[in-house]
Image: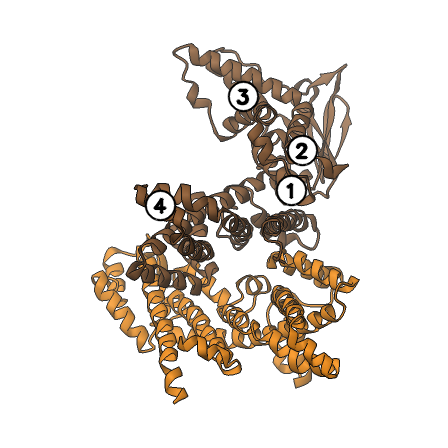
């Protein structure tokens, strides 16, 4: 009974996501077709003879009327065929696959770090409310929030790579690292990814910290916490079983958005540290006018945000039964 | 003591200070104004051929340096608007605005000026370089326009100047010998500006160092504030217009239009803004106009949401209904009845949006998609400094520091304003 009542709004929610996805595809198509410049000349050679250029255009279907191109475009994407990258001469999905795998791992590690450190800091700040450490952390979070990620990255490179000469600054591993044993390889990977991870995580840590701290404070002022305290529960149990779950609850949708954005690619971090991720792939594709690859990357980024938002909403509904009532209304 | 100063007093006193320190230069600019106006009256002189960007820039800043303090002292309304107390964040933003307006007066240099790169490249902050000046060629044919041109060349800073020679060390014998890192050159003494038979050696200080082409970092940072603020203001205005007008349409009409606009808003919120901006800039080319429009187009969604919910609640209020029944036009309804009510949340949103745009502009310049190639920009400076991170830290940290301080001040201002109107806001 309950399930069928929830099902309709849930389907509605999914359908809305699909509509947004469709609009996204259309929007990207319109933008790319509006842009000036002939892709066949830009790509192969500017000296291409008109006949050869026409042949190339034909082979990519660029000579047909715009609406036919559009329908071909949408139907191909819906069947999972993103076309062949002009630049890599490979199907787009297989180009994206490797880059996406890296981004997925990188983003997941970064998100875990963000949540873990934010939780620790928020706890420290909450336990020492109004004391020096709380004020220090709050002030620091405001400052760090205003620092652009490329400045953070360059400061880190300057300190750890240039001055202390401890960590490498680009790539994900040393060349010929295959010859090393497993442990050395792991160490190599960690040293290469340490600075990028700090760069990518620091902004998220600040945002999560701020939300968590404020949520903890506002939850602790509610009457049920006072009630629990009066009943004689220990502070530890109150914190871990009642305060924390209630404070994390509103954070879920923010985590969803953040994770979606991270999966689209950490553009600046990847560019500075020369990492093989989605962000850098997108930038290169855009600069090369590699239409199919641009479309593929952008759509993957958009889909990731839509999906993570949806999943975050579902988790929220699962964990908080009050939301079901709102949804049905 | 400092907290007693009001913002308008600060603006006035800093402008007066600039005027006093640069009085020589301003007087020569005034002379130039006089000459130009004189030749305008004289027919037959094609004066417009001498105008270029930096000339107009310098001329107008020489006027504004007088107009701004006078206007602030005379106009009591302006005094009222800028009557809040001076805080660190206000002061930084005020100084930035003044740098924006008076850039040529503050620096007295062209941001692209470079000469003798061997000597001047990658200099540390506060380094001092010696130079001698060559005598100018005396022109033989005097034409009114040429006189004016030579005057302009003398006063307005150009990106290249033949008459200056930078050197490390020198030796005076029959001729003037000078060293430029391992290279020895000679100039005849008669060609140099001399006093008592000895060439006049002057020095120039690079306050924040110089970059790989020997350009002064301080000058470029001051001029870089123009791009950041210009793009910031422009994009915020675009977002404001888009957000408010769309919100008004959606809230007033409801129904299908509301649904469509809300879906489009969702779409824009879904699309990762930085990719959208990059895509459009790469496709349509990047100039000031396209960057402003693109950043404006990607930043109106939160404003739209705030404004829409506010307008929906205003819609059923009696004062609004009566204004509507009187027959006010939509544009008047929006400006007279709605804007005054929603101005505070909108303004706070715009200020945070402004900081986002400044950040986005510098990030774009950093990625090489901005305006950094044609005009100094903080992001582009940091990007080009990256290559010299090992030997020249100032190329990255000076513009980076200015950028961070700017963003901090803007965010602080936004937080203060929202706090003063909404005490529960943290």
Tag 3 and tag 2 share a subunit: yes
Mark 2 or mark 1, which has the lower sequence index? Answer: 2
For label 1, the residue is: B90
Q: Is residue B401 left or right of residue B31?
A: right
Please report, as a chain letter, where disc 3 is located: B
Q: Are marks 4 and 1 in contact (CB under 8 Å)?
A: no
| Residue B10, numbered label | 2
| Camera sees residue A184 | no
What residue is shown at x 68% (from left), y 58% (from top)?
A: A155
| Residue B322, numbered label | 4
Q: Which chain is orange?
A: A
| Camera sees residue A86 | yes
How far apart are labels 2 and 4 at the CA level?
A: 44 Å
Q: What colour is chain B? A: brown
Please report, as a chain letter, where disc 2 is located: B
Tag 4 and tag 3 share a subunit: yes
10 Å crowding of disc 1: few (<14), some (14-19), many (20+): some
For label 3, the residue is: B152
Q: Are marks 2 and 1 in contact (CB under 8 Å)?
A: yes
Quarter of the figure with the C terminus of chain A: bottom left
Mark 3 or mark 1, which has the lower sequence index? Answer: 1
Please report, as a chain letter, where disc 1 is located: B
Q: Is residue A74 left or right of residue B78?
A: left
Tag 3 and tag 1 share a subunit: yes
Tag 4 and tag 1 share a subunit: yes
What residue is shown at x 69% (from left), y 76% (from top)?
A: A226
Q: How many marks?
A: 4
| B129 vs A257, nearest the viewer | A257
How far apart are labels 2 and 1 at the CA level?
A: 10 Å
Mark 4 or mark 3, which has the lower sequence index? Answer: 3
B276 over A221 or under it: above or below: above
């Amino acid at each position: 009974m309950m399930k069928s009542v929830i099902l309709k709004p849930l389907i509605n929610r999914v359908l809305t996501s699909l509509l947004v996805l469709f609009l996204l595809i259309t929007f990207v198509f319109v933008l790319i077709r509006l842009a000036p410049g002939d892709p066949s000349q830009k790509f192969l050679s500017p000296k291409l003879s008109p006949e050869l250029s026409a042949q190339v255009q034909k082979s990519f279907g660029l000579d047909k009327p715009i609406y036919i191109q559009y329908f071909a475009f949408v139907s191909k994407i819906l069947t999972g065929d993103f076309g062949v990258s002009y630049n890599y001469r490979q199907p787009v999905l297989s180009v994206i696959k490797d880059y996406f795998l890296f981004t997925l791992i990188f983003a997941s590690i970064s998100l875990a770090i963000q949540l873990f450190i934010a939780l620790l800091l928020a706890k420290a700040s909450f336990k020492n409310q109004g004391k020096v450490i709380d004020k220090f952390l709050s002030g620091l979070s405001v400052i760090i929030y205003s620092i652009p990620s490329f400045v953070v990255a360059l400061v880190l490179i300057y300190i750890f790579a240039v001055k202390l000469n401890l960590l490498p600054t680009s790539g994900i591993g040393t060349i010929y690292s295959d010859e090393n044993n497993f442990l050395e390889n792991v160490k190599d990977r960690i040293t290469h990814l340490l600075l990028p991870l700090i760069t990518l995580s620091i902004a998220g840590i600040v945002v999560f910290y701020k939300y968590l701290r404020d949520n903890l404070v506002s939850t602790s002022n509610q009457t049920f916490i006072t009630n629990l305290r009066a009943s004689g529960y220990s502070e530890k149990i109150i914190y871990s079983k009642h305060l924390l779950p209630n404070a994390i609850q509103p954070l879920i949708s923010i985590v969803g958005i953040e994770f979606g954005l991270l999966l689209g690619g950490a553009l600046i971090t990847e560019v500075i540290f020369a990492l093989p991720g989605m962000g850098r792939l997108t930038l290169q594709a855009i600069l090369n006018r590699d239409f199919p690859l641009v479309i593929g990357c952008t759509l993957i980024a958009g889909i990731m945000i839509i999906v993570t938002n949806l999943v975050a909403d579902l988790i929220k509904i699962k964990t908080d039964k009050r939301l079901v009532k709102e949804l049905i209304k | 003591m400092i907290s007693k100063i009001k913002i308008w007093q600060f603006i006035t006193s800093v402008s007066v200070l600039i005027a006093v320190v640069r009085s020589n230069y301003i007087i020569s600019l005034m002379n130039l104004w006089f000459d130009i106006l004189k030749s305008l009256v004289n027919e037959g002189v094609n004066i417009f051929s001498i105008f270029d960007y930096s000339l107009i820039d310098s001329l107008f800043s020489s006027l504004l340096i007088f107009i701004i303090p006078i206007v602030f002292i005379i106009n009591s309304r302006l005094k009222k608007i800028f009557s809040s107390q001076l805080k660190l964040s206000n002061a930084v933003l005020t100084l930035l605005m003044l740098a924006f307006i008076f850039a040529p007066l503050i620096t007295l240099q062209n941001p692209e000026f470079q000469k003798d790169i061997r000597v001047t490249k990658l200099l540390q902050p506060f380094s001092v370089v010696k130079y001698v000046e060559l005598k100018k060629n005396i022109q033989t044919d005097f034409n009114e326009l040429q006189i004016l041109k030579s005057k302009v060349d003398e006063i307005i800073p150009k990106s290249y100047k033949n008459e200056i020679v930078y050197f490390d060390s020198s030796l005076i014998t029959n001729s003037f010998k000078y060293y430029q890192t391992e290279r020895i050159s000679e100039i005849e003494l008669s060609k140099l500006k001399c006093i008592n038979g000895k060439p006049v050696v002057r020095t120039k200080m690079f306050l924040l160092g110089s970059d790989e082409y020997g350009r002064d970092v301080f000058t470029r940072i001051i001029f870089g504030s123009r791009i950041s603020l210009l793009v910031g203001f422009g994009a915020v205005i675009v977002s404001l217009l888009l957000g408010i007008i769309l919100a008004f349409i959606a809230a007033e009409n409801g129904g299908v239009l509301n649904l469509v606009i809300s879906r489009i808003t969702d779409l824009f919120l879904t699309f990762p803004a930085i990719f959208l901006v990059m895509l459009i800039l790469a496709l349509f080319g990047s100039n000031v106009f396209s960057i402003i429009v693109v950043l404006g187009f990607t930043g109106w969604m939160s404003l739209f949401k705030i404004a829409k919910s506010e307008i929906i609640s205003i819609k059923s209020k009696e004062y609004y209904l009566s204004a509507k029944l009187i027959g006010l036009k939509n544009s008047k309804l929006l400006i007279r009845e709605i804007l005054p009510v929603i101005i505070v949340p909108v303004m706070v949103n715009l200020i945070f949006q402004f900081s986002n745009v400044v950040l986005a502009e510098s990030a774009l310049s950093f990625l090489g998609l901005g305006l950094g190639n044609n005009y100094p920009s903080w992001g582009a400076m940091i990007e080009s400094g990256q290559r010299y991170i090992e030997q020249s830290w100032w190329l990255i940290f000076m513009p980076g520091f200015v950028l961070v301080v700017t963003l901090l001040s803007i965010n602080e201002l936004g937080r203060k304003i929202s706090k003063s109107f909404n005490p529960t806001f943290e």
